[in-house]
Image: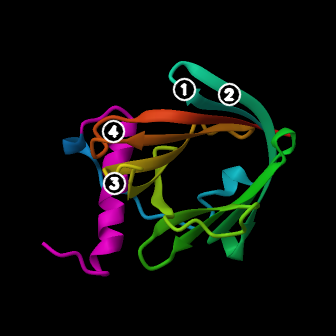
Amino acid sequence: MSTTSADLPRRAVLQSAAGLALAAGAPVATARPLPPGKPGDFNFLTGEWRISHRRLKAPGEWDMFEGEATCWSIIGGVGHVEELRIPARDFSGAGLRFLDLETKVWSDFWINAKSGALGVAGLTGGFVDGVGLFTTDDKDADGKPVRYAGVWDQITGTSHRWRQGVSKDGGATWDYSWFMDWVKA
């Protein structure tokens, strides 16, 4: 069956809803439709942050380092900008998040400051019960299909967590290799 451009937003919503259910421990069969995104969904991120990173280098070996970010809302909450800085690594970049007002689905893009290039495969998704899940399908170095996820959870007024995962089985299981614990500065 072929996929048309009209099917892509629907496909993204269904994939994100299934991924949210899996991330929460629910089986795919009970996945609820993703609620429509709305301006301001990323307002929890606005402000100055200190971030503790934990990134998997090899099985059982974690690289831990500190960072910081400044985040703000744009165009009435339809967009959100994150400027991430990791001074000890001489690294910076930007997260750009935009709500498609027609489909009500968020897109999440990354720009590495060293290249200045907008990441090709933006993640799409939204929030269910205070957890944001954003996914994209891609291929690994061997050309095998994988699904990547960025998850925003444990959201409070002064902290939250972001984690990055990969699934090699269509979202049935996830391996998380990067955790960022954010605390309001």
Cα distance, mark 4 to mark 1? 25 Å
Cα distance, mark 1 to mark 3? 21 Å
Q: Nearer the viewer, residue 79 or 95?
A: 95
Disc 4: which residue: 22
Disc 2: which residue: 63
Q: Earlier in the sequence, mark 1 or mark 2?
A: 1
Is 183 positioned to the left or the right of 2 in the image?
A: right
What's the residue type where badge 4 is placed? Leu
Which numbered tag is attached to residue 137? none
Q: Secondary structure at mark 4?
A: helix
Rendered location of residue 27, percent (x, y)? 24, 36
Q: Nearer the viewer, mark 2 or mark 3?
A: 3
What's the residue type where badge 1 is placed? Ala
What's the residue type where badge 2 is placed? Asp
Cα distance, mark 4 to mark 3? 24 Å
Specify the principal SS of the magenta part.
helix
Residue span colored magenta: 1-27
Is 56 positioned to the left or the right of 121 in the image?
A: right
Residue at image position (31%, 50%) is: 144
Assess whether mark 2 and mark 4 are in contact (beta carbons under 8 angstroms). no
Rendered location of residue 159, percent (x, y)? 71, 36
Q: In the rendered view, would you say 97 is above or below 16? A: below
Q: Secondary structure at mark 3?
A: loop
Disc 3: which residue: 143
Is 29 positioned to the left or the right of 129 in the image?
A: left
Disc 1: which residue: 58
State which quarter of the image contains the C terminus: top right
What's the residue type where badge 3 is placed? Gly
Assess whether mark 1 and mark 4 are in contact (beta carbons under 8 angstroms). no
Q: Nearer the viewer, mark 4 or mark 2?
A: 2
Rendered location of residue 171, percent (x, y)? 31, 43
Residue at image position (59%, 63%) is: 109
